[in-house]
Image (tube, coloured by chain):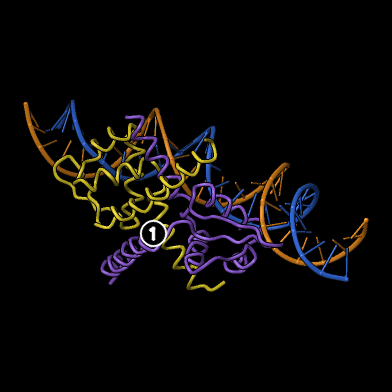
Chain colours: A yellow, B purple, C orange, D blue
Amino acid sequence: MNRALWNKAAQRAMVVKALAHPSRLLIAEALADGERCVQELTELVAADMSTVSRHLTLMKSVGLIESEKRGLNVYYRLSCPCFSDFLRCVDLITRRQATALQRVAG
Amino acid sequence: MNRALWNKAAQRAMVVKALAHPSRLLIAEALADGERCVQELTELVAADMSTVSRHLTLMKSVGLIESEKRGLNVYYRLSCPCFSDFLRCVDLITRRQATALQRVAG
DNA sequence: TTCATACTTGGCCAAAAGGCCAAGTAGCCA
DNA sequence: TGGCTACTTGGCCTTTTGGCCAAGTATGAA
């Protein structure tokens, strides 16, 4: 097993993992539309604020999002404009899979 | 929490999760280059064949890959041509993050 | 029909992820 | 100062994930 190859894959995996959760995808989608504070995101995903904060910390740690404190609030925003491409590919697969399952069931 | 929104995010998350592992990313990358049998992929990621088989089953279950048995071998191939776009976005983020960390360290 | 190869699945265990509550920190306002 | 709000972090627990080994299935060859 080539070490360099593995390291590259591991790095990529960290980024992908940071999006591999429904709440985090919802958060990223919201941020694609503009910055949001933790409160707003907490309301969006309907979880404990501490949980949301941890999600955000994780996403930030891999460079997916950035944060800025203004007053009492911390505002997060996407740091990559390519997220929409990412989602487009994912949606292609989910849609293809949905129709494939329908074929089986139908 | 809007149920429909959550379901959509959950579906997407399943696909993203299926790529959120170094071995599975390596596998997907290899398959982007053409079909491979389990043996070849096992060699590639240097894990137990049973482990690789489970990775493949997971990836297949979300519609990321397809399989075909020919003789003793089972050949897997990517079912989405958009994987390269997906990777491009991920790499943008990892590269951006790498330089960001260098700024901090340097 | 027996044997070998290629793969999948069951069983089990260790490690990681994800959640909440409670406690801590930081900024604003009275 | 004191208290309120917004957020993060520590602690702890449950669930999920990922791994291997061993056993099972399926196909081709002798």
Coordinates of residue B5 in the picture (x, y in percent): 33, 35
Question: In front here: B24 or C5?
Answer: C5
Relative to B102, say whether C29 is above or below.
above
Residue B46 lies in quadrant: bottom right
Q: Residue at x 55, y 65 (%)?
A: B35
Q: Quadrant of the C terminus of chain B?
A: bottom left
Q: Residue at x 33, y 48 (%)?
A: A57
**SS of the residue under disc 1:** loop
* Residue A71 horizontal side relative to residue A81, left or right: left
Residue B14 in the image, given as x and y percentages of width and height: 46, 45
Disc 1: which residue: B82
In x, y percent, where is residue D13? 53, 33
Q: How many marks?
A: 1
Viewed as shown, does residue C9 lie left or right of A99? right
Residue at 41 percent across and 48 percent down: it is A20
Quarter of the image holding residue A21? top left
Question: Looking at the image, which is closer to me, A96 or B103?
Answer: A96
In percent of the image, x 46 and y 55: which residue is there? Answer: B19
Measured along the vertical axis of the image, is residue A37 above or below residue D1? Answer: below
Q: Is residue A9 above or below residue A46?
A: below
| Classed neighbour count for the residue bearing mark 1: other residues with Cα under 10 Å, few (<14), some (14–19), many (≥20) | some
**Image mark 1: chain:** B
Residue A51 at what x, y percent from top left? 36, 38
Name the residue type under label 1. Answer: Cys
**Which quadrant of the rendered structure holds the N terminus of chain B?**
top left
